[in-house]
Image: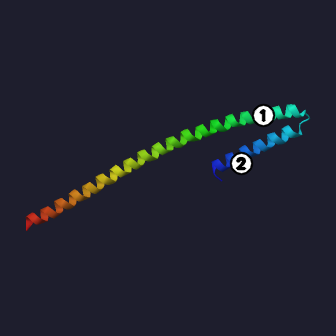
Amino acid sequence: MTKGKFALGALIGAVAGVIAGVLTAPKSGKETRTDIKDKAVELKGEAVKRADEVRNKSATVVDDVKEKADDYRGRGERTIEGVIEGAKKAFFSKESKK
């Protein structure tokens, strides 16, 4: 199970637990609605915070992957250029020996 799925499951479980606890508590309807609203605002803030964290981390990962891809592309280009230069030298040195 991935961390994301586990975190989502834990969040859903926490929300369900809070709702069940609030609805079964011996409070008036007005108090219960206030508690639900307050908890919803709190959970929304937490969700926004987590979304920002994920967004920032994914941006970092994307930048790292781009940097590595550019590095590998450069290495590949230099290798190909080296092979081509070696082939030219070998070809022309054989030509000059004829």
Q: Residues within 10 Å of mark 2 (few under 14, many from 20)?
A: few
- The residues bearing labels 1 and 2 have C-alpha atoms spaced at a distance of 22 Å
Nearest the camera: 59 or 79? 59
Tell me what residue is drawn at x 86 percent, y 40 percent: 23
Residue bearing mark 2: 9
Q: Residue furthest bottom?
A: 98
Q: Quadrant of residue 67?
A: top left
Q: Is residue 8 left or right of residue 26?
A: left
Tell me what residue is drawn at x 51 percent, y 41 percent: 59
Q: Quadrant of residue 38?
A: top right
Residue type at numbered disc 1 = Lys
Tell me what residue is drawn at x 68 percent, y 47 percent: 8
Relative image position of residue 34 (x, y in whole percent): 82, 31
Is 67 situated above or below 86? above
Q: Secondary structure at mark 2?
A: helix
Q: Quadrant of residue 37?
A: top right
Q: Residue furthest front?
A: 30
Relative image position of residue 50 (x, y in whole percent): 63, 38
Residue type at numbered disc 2 = Gly
Relative image position of residue 78 (x, y in whole percent): 29, 52
Tell me what residue is drawn at x 63 percent, y 51 percent: 2
Residue bearing mark 1: 37
Q: Residues within 10 Å of mark 1 (few under 14, many from 20)?
A: few
